[in-house]
Image (cartoon, rainbow, N blue to C red):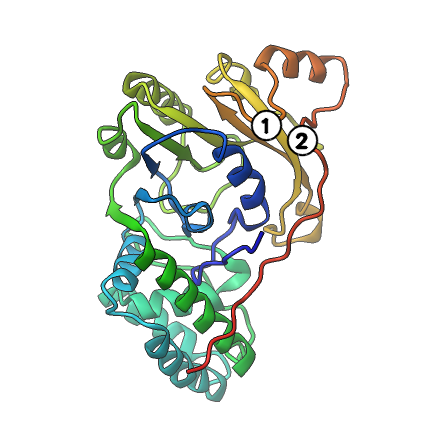
Amino acid sequence: MKIFVPPIKSQGIKTKLVEWIKSNAEQVDYDRWVEPFMGTGVVAFNVRPKRALLCDSNPHIIKFYNSLKSKEITSKIVKKYLIKEGEQLLASEGKHYYEIRNRFNENGSSLDFLFLSRSCFNGMMRFNKKGGYNVPFCKKPNRFAQALVTKITNQVENISQIIEKGDFEFKNLDFKETLKNIDSKDLVYCDPPYIGRHVDYFDSWSEEEEIFLRDGLIDANAKFILSTWLSNKYRTNDYIFSVWKEYSISTKEHFYHVGGKESNRNAVYEALLSNVKLNDSISNKVMQSRINTNQSQLTSNQNKTTLPEQLSLKL
């Protein structure tokens, strides 16, 4: 399958897991796709439901995609902007990044948000307590060379076309508010910050919120698929066997490139938890037994990952 990569980048993006998630979602009947934590939007944009409610607590993400939807931002505008700002970035030997960051923190420009997400250190999306973007520069003054500008421009065009062809609603809502807007005909895909692991997200995440999310899904009587982590070489996510103990689990091995050091970039068993039957899913109790007896935690086949493809665009 062709994987459409969003122009916004952040750590933990599900690009390499989209095919797996989509194949499971295709087995479920639903009227509307809902995401309380849309992040970059990579899952929804590749599942491409007929109707979708995509929400996030980060207002800058929602503002950016609403700007694509309204055509306030287009691929041509992005290309012109990145060429101009990229030239200034190079001429200033990277100092212009901090001018853009200060400007963004003052006026919240969606174009500046895109610039920062594509030129910050290690693809991080981190904000201080006052809501200010505070990620440092990636130290590559020639960051916006022609090849990357073309790539980002194509990504903007591809996602804009997907939004135009579907019925997508983008809302800046806390997940608790989003839960009030779902019902039994929805399929809710949840990708909350991974509890028990270091995360850089717009908000923090706690056990209390994990439980609130579970209870909200139960109260709405909605079908759901939730992404989380099962284990790495250091430890196991015990919340799966407490908070989510009633639900089936499907797993896949994945390698994250998110740590600042190579030693922090390790394989993780990703998990999909659901209240509906998924491909290769097993019961929570069976998985816990596997872990206790040192059996394989993998339920899905180790397929080769489909590389993201870019469509050519002539401007």
Which type of secondary structure does the marked residue at label 1 adopt? loop
The residue positioned 67% from the left and 47% from the top of the image is 265
Classify residue 112 by image quadrant: bottom left
Amino acid, disc 2 = Ser
Q: Indicate left or right for 36 with 289 as reference.
A: left
Q: Is residue 20 above or below residue 129?
A: above
Q: Indicate left or right for 290 with 103 as reference.
A: right
User: Residue 118 in the image: x percent, y percent?
Assistant: 47, 66
Which type of secondary structure does the marked residue at label 2 adopt? loop
The residue positioned 36% from the left and 59% from the top of the image is 133
Viewer-side residue, 48 vs 93:
48
Viewer-side residue, 304 vs 295:
304
Sooner in the amino-acid sequence: mark 1 or mark 2: 1
Q: In the image as oriented, which residue stretches furthest toward the bottom?
A: 91
Identify the residue position indicated by label 2 in the image.
300
The residue positioned 61% from the left and 54% from the top of the image is 260
Amino acid, disc 1 = Asn
Classify residue 85 by image quadrant: bottom left
Q: Is residue 276 above or below residue 17?
A: above
The residue positioned 64% from the left and 52% from the top of the image is 306
Q: Are marks 1 and 2 in contact (CB under 8 Å)?
A: yes
Quadrant of image for the C terminus: bottom left
Tell me the distance, in whole angstroms, between the alpha carbons under discs 1 and 2.
Answer: 8 Å
Identify the residue position indicated by label 1 in the image.
279
- The 10 Å Cα crowd at callout 1, few under 14, some 14 to 19, many 20 or more, is some
User: Residue 283 in the image: x percent, y percent?
Assistant: 59, 14
